Image: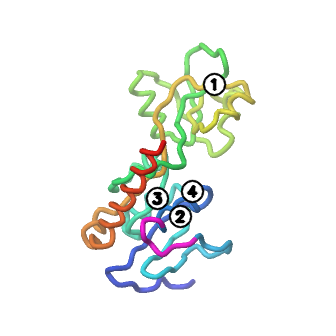
Amino acid sequence: MTPAPTHGPQHLTLALPKGRILEEAVALLARAGLPLTVPEKSRALRHEFPGVTVLELRNQDVPVYVDLGVADAGIVGKDVLLESGRAVYEPVDLRFAGCRLSLIREVGASGDISRVGTKYPRAARAYLNARGIPAEIVKLSGNIELACLTGLADAVVDLVQTGSTLRANHLEEVDVLFHSSARLIVNRAALKVRRERLRPLIEALRGLTQDVEGGE
């Protein structure tokens, strides 16, 4: 195993998610002044740049690495952040990778909800509790829609972007729990220790995302 390199106090370690968010995250961070490029396709999970280390992680692991201080900051979807329950600082909505977490049922379904399938049990439980629905929650990992289609669950809680998968499977959104987008998250101790690196980055990202908002 290759040991982690030793870095000085001005060095930043960033936790970024694999997949669709990675390229947009790197591009935005580069515009904010960090010397980053999209890592070449390889099996490497740690990428070194001048003054910055990028850790390439699964989405669900990003808040863990930031909260426990292995990474100083990271980028992750709001849906993953809320489900993680991690106590990190969330200074910037980066306004990309937009989607929504919704309650989904078969079209026309009207019976009581006694069982809900989801990848997001924490968010689903909070939603159901707030509405006094004592449904059982079944945690699933993939193809959540099948829980409705096979009768495993009366409803599912899942991410929706375009809704095309729902329409193709005769499903519909009944309610929206919340809207999600990519967020910058920061370790609270690092915000003090690496203030000179993190504060300018936060302000640069705020400026860039305000430009995006104003142009929409």
Query: Is residue 110 rendered magenta in the image?
Result: no
Q: Which residue is mark 2?
A: 27
As drawn, is 107 to the left or to the right of 47? Answer: right
Local crowd size for mark 4, using a 10 Å CA cut-off: few (<14), some (14–19), many (≥20): some
The residue positioned 37% from the left and 62% from the top of the image is: 204
Q: Residue furthest front?
A: 215
The residue positioned 54% from the left and 32% from the top of the image is: 102
Local crowd size for mark 1, using a 10 Å CA cut-off: few (<14), some (14–19), many (≥20): some
Q: Which residue is mark 4?
A: 21
Q: Which mark is residue 75?
A: 3
Cα distance in 3D space between marks 3 and 2: 12 Å
Q: Residue furthest left?
A: 192
The residue positioned 69% from the left and 26% from the top of the image is: 151
Range of residues picked out in magenta: 31-37
**Residue kind at label 4, given as amino acid type:** Ile
* Comes first in the chain, label 3 or label 4: 4
Which quadrant would residue 110 be assigned to in this image? Answer: top right
The residue positioned 41% from the left and 27% from the top of the image is: 129
Which percent across, then down, holds residue 24?
55, 59
Q: Which residue is mark 1?
A: 172
Query: Do callouts 3 and 4 mark residues in contact (Cβ within 8 Å)?
Result: yes
**Residue kind at label 3, given as amino acid type:** Ile
Which percent across, then down, holds residue 6?
41, 86
* Comes first in the chain, label 2 or label 1: 2
Which percent across, then down, holds residue 14?
45, 68
Which type of secondary structure does the marked residue at label 3 adopt? strand
Position above or below: 132 against 13: above
